[in-house]
Image: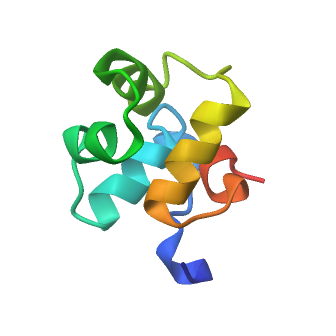
Amino acid sequence: MTQTDVPVMDQEQGRTSRLKAILKKRHKSQMWLVGKTKLPKSVVSRICSGKLTNYHTNTLKKICEALNVTSAAILGF
């Protein structure tokens, strides 16, 4: 993933998770991510909605591998 593929989050977009923005840019759905990661649908949904911000590193690793991104792209570092 190139630098331009990672969505830039401004204050107005702060409530939208980076994960949701990456999925949208790649034309992928939350259900696609559930299938690729084998994570529960509820976990993916809560991460995408921003309701779940503190999750296990294994969860982050699965998401990063499925999307071929670094954790910085998801976490915003």
- Front-most of residues 66 and 9: 66
Q: x, y percentage for residue 53?
A: 62, 23
Query: Is residue 54 found left or right of 19 in the rendered image?
Result: right
Which residue appears at 34% of the width and 48% of the height? 36
> Relative to the observer, which residue lies in front, 36 or 5?
36
How many numbered circles are shown?
Answer: 0
Display coloring: rainbow
Q: Residue 21 location in percent, x, y? A: 40, 52
Q: Indicate the quadrant where residue 69 lies.
A: bottom right
Which residue does the image show at 54% across and 78% down from the upper left? 1
Observer-nearest of 53 and 44: 44
**In the picture provided, is 61 more to the left or to the right than 29?**
right
Residue 7 x %, y %: 50, 63
Residue 4 placement, left or right of 43: right
The residue at the point 29 percent across, 56 percent down is 24
Residue closer to the observer: 60 or 5: 60
- Residue 38 location, x and y as percent? 37, 34
Q: Residue furthest front?
A: 38
Which residue is situated farthest in the right direction here? 77
Q: On screen, 65 above or below 68? A: above
